[in-house]
């Protein structure tokens, strides 16, 4: 639930008087933390950096999905489709597949755009559906996209996947190592989360919340639910697309295996385990869902068994998500003194 | 007036075509019956708890394994005149064992989450599914285990199509089970309680029905049926393997949705329809399109139908019609 | 500026709820619609607000045929309503319940709100200011941060009306505003409603509480079995024999207290049914 | 469960292999917890056997060898993560990874960046495309695997029409494509080329269609249990055509799954000569049974071979056993492996890949081609 989040965000200080001191302090803390992050992470062993990259990619995905599930209350079990669209748009536009070799930057935009469009197009037919019915249809869409990737051999090279994807360059610098990608991913992730937060606090976010709470009443007060829902689908899909493009550039190989129904479930798990509709929760969830399986590496083939137990345990202990509802960005900012 | 050669060749082709179609129909019905049986478990649980029970597919898988060992244990007897009894015994035992497992899981993993958002139990079920699958893989077997056929390998030829005894058995048995279940739910007091709870738990509670009894019952019967489906499936295809659950489960769930989630006859219909769809997609589409649309498009075909049905009739074939408002509950998220 | 229903009909399957009704609602007045249960009062409101499809006939307001519009477009034309069974955004605070009403007027500026620093705070303050008025008028100021679900029944009703007024409607339809309120609350409500009258605002109230209606309304329509039975001032209505027939089955006593009491009882049952119909049961 | 979870998080090294510093680690990543777990597990068992033997023989310069077995779930993402894990661990001097081509291709980038000698079991031709200096493939690629059966079908069986089915996985699709090309190039006619899902168990629809085409041979590109079920249903629906499948089917389970009667006459391609053909293989089979009381999986022999090749290279590297020296030594491998002589060309491909066709007779596989 985003309710209290937004409430704090909108109604701190009715007069709108700004406490400069507090703001400066908060800003200082945040900048300090960022600097620490940027300085500290690259000094870690590459394996950890790679894990962090993965966390950031999944954070992008989860932030996107959270807009649909958490804000607008529309359960989407096929979100991975947009990730796939993003990934394949980089794979096709920057590889030997069709011998097209566009640079990374533009494809990031294109991939995001394509995914966003797909999100809207898939959104239109399901406007009337909600709850589990929506979930199943989106599941269907997700599988259809994956199967198409697997079957349209002439385009996507089918199950063989597309290998030897171009090395991405940004402003002339090659993105090679996980460290390079960390420096790309971090700002993008921060941007995405901030964007999501600003949206959550904006009138659009309120509109989504209203739709989640009572769609009919929402229409009754003049909310164009069609438009609001399509915006949700489109925006979330766009973030998914970004994640996909980066993933493809990162792996330099894409194949349909990476976009299975299971991946969609993982993203849903992230936002639910973190705390649905709460961005802090999304961040925590992404970290947990990516890091825990790595912690269990040492158990070799017992890993998935323990992972399953861990999932059930976490959900039983914190059904509402690890992060409590009101421990949202606004709460953190307040703790930092931003008022 | 066709040239005589063409006519003769047509006459020659005709029986081939019919036998082909009949064969495909038989295939469709068999796989459909199995889907239908599993779909029942999904539909019952969903009908009452509105819970997509991802663990159900693993019940089906566990059922196969349990029966495998029971059959192995009773192998000495099965040859004798007791054979039939032994088989029935194994069926019953498996039903009970897996049923109890289902009840246990509900107690442990779902009941504590009744008050939570509806996503929580769904994902906890997912976790249970992972645990069950890996547990079987690690502690039972990675290898596909050869499952004994408890029926003599008799096969009949119906206008050129091969129909085996176990195919007939599967369809008949499945239908029989479903009829029994329908009778149980509609005709007995326990069944009525179940229906009451699924109609409106609150009201049921007010009427003094202990909600937990029907729910336990459902988590006994659902997995039990899933397990029986597991036996049929295993003996029909001749193997059990730890990884056999997920995909079949997903398809069965889709069948349940197609037929109208929450409706027993719907699950039945949905199962058969999905069976037909798949067979059509894999067997006929390529023939009709001369291989332009290959059999690999089967699932795309099936999923597209699912999507279309849901978009135009969210309630599925037999489910009660749902309004846009009816699709979502206050505590969804 | 008048709202007129022309030959309005509504049928549910075989049941004809509204059977060719022609009504004219004048702005600047409080017009009430009364009638026994099942007379079709709420159905009228639901059709006007676009919740029900109109079977035949037209709803004219400012030369627009409302029945052709989508629900949110109707709201966009300044038609606001409250519901017989309260429909607030339970998970949101009172403040947000009001603020979200400004959706359509701010949606166009979302981009600026999200990307231009400072703007969001400005918009928020603007909206907060608007909400503050409404909060103050309905005496909800101190609940601004409470979840709508946690409000008392009476305050929930007030909040719902406040939400409607925030759309500053040209047509304001209230479905049983006094239902389930105690005396004090009812009087307070009366004052508030009077204060909502504007020369350019059509106010429609559907209510069972006779004393409430009689003391509040300027004009009354009496519906019976989907048809207009009688219209006139409260005095005329009270004097009219047919109305008494329709209501009590026996002439005499029209001070309505007993009537109101009985109907409230009925209504409670009605509402609980309505709840069950409206959304399928929540999971156990 | 919470206990287990905590144990999992904090007691990380409780079960896990965390060797003493002096040990030389060989990393391996394959599918251990998905549908292909059987292959991944038995494959790694094969390596374990080789490592154990080496240790029994005193290890490398007295240093003990440790096989670090990891699970990549056939998922490229995890493959690269594991690759990084191995790269960062200075104790790891060589890896045998990965099992699936789709995982090997992206992970080889990572291994290449840290110069870790990588011996792979993925047969897709694309794997060696990059021409990485540290990547070696001691097995035949799909060209061999899919080509030889096609040639055999055309020449020896004089087949005219073939129906091809594949499970839309990188491997199945790869070999099936090669089979198709070879068969058509050889003048044969492919009556149908159908895709199924790897997870399928019911092939009756496809088979019923194939039946109407009555082909001389049916080729199935895919893995177990699909192959076994397909073969079973193929025979049950009365298709008599000769059946071909690739090495994942070289398992007793094929026969148990399909039933001896149905399996009889099926031709399976496999890269090792019969177990009873050489004492070495017989020894391997018995050792494997002793170690894991189970029959070797289809890839156990490959795994053993791959590990043995690395160990040999380490031995040759003498006193300075480093990633670099191992890569260097792997290049001039002249090794008489479990499955015949091993030499690598400059692309890291096996110089003289061998392939054998086996025919199912009764309950085991008998060599069909090449007739020695």
Image (tube, rainbow, N blue to C red):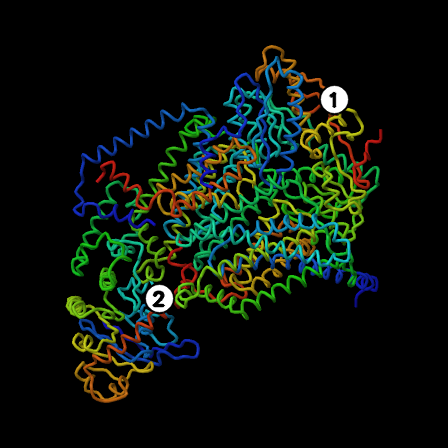
Disc 1: host chain = D
With C169 as the anchor, is B302 left or right in this view? right
C-alpha separation, residue under disc 1 versus residue under disc 2: 81 Å
**In this rendering, is residue D285 above or below A127?**
above
| SS category of the residue bearing label 1 | strand
Disc 2: host chain = C
The label shown at residue C69 is 2
Instruction: For marks 1 and 2, give the one nearer the viewer.
Output: 1
Q: Which quadrant, please, contains the C terminus of chain D?
A: top right
- In the image, A20 versus B14, the foreground residue is A20
Give the residue drawn at x 42%, y 59%: C284
Count the marks: 2
Q: Residue A6, how many percent across, how many down?
A: 28, 48
Q: Residues within 10 Å of mark 1 (few under 14, many from 20)?
A: some
With B104 as the anchor, is A230 left or right in this view? left
Q: Residue D339, how many percent across, how many down?
A: 74, 26
- In the image, A59 versus A86, the foreground residue is A59
Q: Which residue, given by chain and number where applicable, does mark 1 sit on?
A: D341
Give the residue drawn at x 83%, y 64%: B4
| SS category of the residue bearing label 2 | loop
Disc 1 with disc 2 on a shared chain: no
Q: Within the image, what quadrant is residue D44 found in?
A: top right
With B53 as the anchor, is D261 left or right in this view? right
Residue contact between numbered discs 1 and 2, judged by CB atoms under 8 Å: no
**In this rendering, is residue B261 above or below A169?**
below
**In this rendering, is residue A97 above or below D59?**
below
Q: Residue C246, how many percent across, how many down?
A: 28, 85
Q: Residues within 10 Å of mark 2 (few under 14, many from 20)?
A: some
Q: Is residue A158 visible?
A: no
Q: Residue A195, how many percent across, how many down?
A: 34, 42
């Amino acid at each position: 639930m985003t309710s209290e989040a937004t409430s704090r965000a909108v109604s701190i200080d009715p007069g709108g008087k700004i406490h400069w001191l507090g703001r400066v302090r908060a800003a200082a803390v945040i900048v300090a933390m960022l600097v620490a992050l940027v300085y500290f992470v690259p000094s870690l062993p590459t394996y950890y950096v790679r894990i962090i990259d993965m966390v950031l990619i999944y954070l992008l995905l989860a932030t996107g999905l959270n807009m649909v599930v958490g804000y607008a209350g529309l359960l989407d079990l096929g979100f991975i489709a947009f990730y796939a669209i993003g990934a394949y748009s980089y794979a096709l536009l920057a590889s030997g597949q069709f011998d097209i070799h566009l640079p990374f930057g533009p494809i990031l935009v294109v991939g995001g755009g394509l995914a966003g469009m797909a999100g809207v197009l898939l959104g239109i037919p399901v406007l009337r559906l909600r709850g589990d019915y929506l979930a199943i249809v989106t599941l269907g869409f997700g599988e259809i996209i994956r199967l198409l990737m697997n079957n349209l051999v002439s385009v996507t090279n089918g199950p063989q996947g597309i290998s030897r994807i171009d090395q991405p360059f940004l402003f002339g610098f090659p993105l090679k190592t996980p460290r390079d990608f960390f420096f790309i991913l971090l700002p993008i992730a921060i941007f995405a989360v901030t964007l999501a937060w600003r949206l959550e606090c904006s009138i659009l976010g309120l509109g989504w919340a209203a739709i989640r709470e009572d769609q009919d009443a929402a229409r009754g007060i003049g909310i164009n639910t069609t438009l609001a829902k399509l915006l949700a689908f489109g925006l979330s899909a766009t973030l998914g697309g970004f994640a996909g493009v980066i993933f493809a550039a990162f792996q330099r190989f894409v194949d349909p295996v990476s976009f299975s129904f299971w991946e969609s479930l993982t993203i849903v798990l992230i936002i639910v385990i973190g705390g649905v509709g709460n961005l802090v929760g999304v961040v925590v969830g992404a970290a947990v869902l990516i890091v825990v399986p790595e912690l269990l590496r040492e158990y070799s083939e017992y890993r998935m068994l323990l992972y399953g137990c861990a999932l059930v345990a976490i959900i039983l202990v914190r059904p509402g998500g690890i992060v409590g509802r009101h421990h949202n960005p606004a709460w953190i900012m307040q703790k930092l003194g931003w008022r | 007036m066709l040239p005589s050669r063409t006519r003769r060749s047509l006459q020659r082709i005709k029986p081939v075509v019919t036998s082909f179609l009949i064969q495909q129909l038989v295939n469709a019905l068999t796989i459909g019956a199995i889907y239908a049986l599993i779909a029942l478990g999904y539909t019952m649980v969903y009908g009452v708890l509105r819970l997509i029970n991802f663990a159900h597919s693993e019940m089906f898988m566990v059922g196969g394994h349990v029966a495998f060992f029971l059959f192995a244990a009773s192998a000495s007897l099965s040859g004798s005149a007791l054979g039939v009894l032994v088989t029935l015994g194994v069926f019953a035992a498996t039903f009970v064992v897996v049923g109890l497992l289902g009840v246990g899981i509900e107690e442990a993993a779902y009941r504590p989450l009744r008050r939570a958002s509806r996503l929580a139990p769904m994902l906890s079920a997912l976790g249970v599914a992972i645990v069950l699958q890996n547990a079987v893989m690690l502690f039972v077997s990675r290898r596909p285990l050869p499952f004994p056929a408890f029926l003599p390998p008799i096969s009949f030829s119906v206008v050129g199509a091969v129909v085996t005894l176990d195919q007939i058995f599967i369809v008949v048995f499945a239908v029989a089970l479903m009829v029994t279940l329908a009778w149980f739910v509609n005709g007995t007091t326990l069944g009525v309680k179940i229906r009451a709870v699924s109609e409106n738990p609150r009201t049921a509670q007010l009427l003094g029905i202990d909600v937990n009894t029907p729910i336990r019952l459902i988590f006994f019967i659902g997995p039990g049926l899933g397990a029986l489906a597991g036996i049929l499936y295993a003996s029909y295809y001749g193997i059990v393997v730890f990884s056999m659950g997920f995909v079949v489960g997903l398809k069965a769930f889709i069948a349940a949705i197609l037929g109208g989630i929450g409706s027993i006859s719907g699950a039945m219909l949905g199962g058969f329809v999905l069976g037909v769809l798949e067979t059509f997609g894999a067997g006929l589409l390529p023939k009709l399109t001369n291989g332009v649309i290959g059999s690999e498009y089967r699932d795309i075909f099936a999923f597209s139908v699912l999507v279309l049905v849901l978009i135009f009739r969210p309630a599925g074939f037999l489910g009660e019609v749902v309004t846009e408002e009816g699709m979502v509950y206050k505590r969804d998220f | 500026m008048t709202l007129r229903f022309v030959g309005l009909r509504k049928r549910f399957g075989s049941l004809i709820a509204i059977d060719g009704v022609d009504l004219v609602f004048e702005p600047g007045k409080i017009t009430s619609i009364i009638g026994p249960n099942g007379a079709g009062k709420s159905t009228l409101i639901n059709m006007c607000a676009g919740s029900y499809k109109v079977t035949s006939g037209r709803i004219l307001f400012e030369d627009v045929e409302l029945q052709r519009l989508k629900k949110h477009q109707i709201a966009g034309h300044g038609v606001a309503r409250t519901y017989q069974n309260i429909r607030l955004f339970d998970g949101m605070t009172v403040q947000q319940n009001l603020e979200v009403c400004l959706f359509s007027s701010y949606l166009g500026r979302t981009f600026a709100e999200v990307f231009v620093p400072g703007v969001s705070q400005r918009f928020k303050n603007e909206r907060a200011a608007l909400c503050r008025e409404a909060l103050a008028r309905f005496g909800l100021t101190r609940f601004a941060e409470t979840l709508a679900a946690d409000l008392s029944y009476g305050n929930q009703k007030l909040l719902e009306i406040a939400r409607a007024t925030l759309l500053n409607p040209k047509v304001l339809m209230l479905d049983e505003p006094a239902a389930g309120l105690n005396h004090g609350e009812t009087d307070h409500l009366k004052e508030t409603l009077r204060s909502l009258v504007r020369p350019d605002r059509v106010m429609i109230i559907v209510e069972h509480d006779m004393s409430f209606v009689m003391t509040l309304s300027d004009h009354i329509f009496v519906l019976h079995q989907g048809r207009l039975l009688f219209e006139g001032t409260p005095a005329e209505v009270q004097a009219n024999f047919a109305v008494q027939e329709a209501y009590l089955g026996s002439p005499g006593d029209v001070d309505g207290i007993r009537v109101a009491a009985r109907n409230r009882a009925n209504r409670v049952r009605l509402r609980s049914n309505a709840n069950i119909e409206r959304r399928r049961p929540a999971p156990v | 469960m919470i206990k287990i979870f905590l144990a999992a998080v904090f007691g990380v090294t409780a079960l896990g292999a965390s060797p003493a510093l002096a040990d030389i680690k060989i990393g391996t990543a394959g599918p251990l917890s998905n549908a292909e777990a059987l292959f991944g597990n038995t494959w790694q068992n094969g390596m374990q056997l080789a490592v154990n033997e080496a240790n029994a023989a005193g290890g490398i310069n007295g240093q003990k060898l440790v096989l670090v077995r990891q699970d990549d779930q056939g998922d490229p993402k995890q493959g690269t993560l594991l690759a990084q894990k191995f790269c960062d661990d200075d104790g790891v001097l060589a890896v045998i990874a990965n099992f699936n081509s789709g995982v090997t291709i992206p992970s080889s980038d990572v291994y290449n960046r840290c110069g870790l000698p990588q011996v792979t079991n993925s047969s897709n031709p694309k794997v060696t495309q990059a021409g990485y200096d540290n990547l070696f493939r001691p097995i035949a690629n799909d060209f061999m695997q899919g080509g030889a059966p096609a040639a055999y079908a055309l020449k020896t069986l004089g087949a005219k029409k073939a129906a091809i089915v594949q499970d839309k996985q990188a491997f199945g699709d790869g070999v099936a494509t090669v089979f198709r090309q070879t068969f058509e190039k050889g003048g044969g006619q492919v009556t149908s080329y159908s895709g199924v899902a790897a997870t399928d168990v019911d092939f009756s629809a496809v088979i019923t269609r194939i039946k109407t085409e009555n082909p001389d041979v049916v080729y199935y590109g895919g893995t177990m249990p699909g192959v076994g079920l397909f073969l079973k249903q193929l025979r049950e629906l009365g298709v008599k055509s000769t059946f071909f499948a690739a090495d994942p089917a070289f398992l007793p389970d094929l026969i148990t799954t399909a039933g001896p009667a149905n399996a009889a006459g099926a031709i399976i391609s496999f890269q090792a000569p019969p177990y009873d053909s050489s004492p070495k293989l017989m020894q391997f089979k018995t050792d494997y049974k002793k170690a894991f009381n189970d029959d070797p999986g289809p890839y156990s022999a490959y795994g053993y071979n791959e590990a043995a090749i690395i160990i040999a290279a380490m031995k040759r590297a003498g006193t300075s056993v480093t990633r670099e020296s191992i890569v260097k030594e792997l290049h001039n491998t002249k090794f008489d492996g479990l499955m015949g002589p091993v030499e690598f060309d400059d692309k890291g491909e096996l110089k003289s890949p061998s392939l054998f066709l086996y025919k199912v007779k009764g309950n085991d596989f008998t060599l069909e081609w090449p007739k020695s």
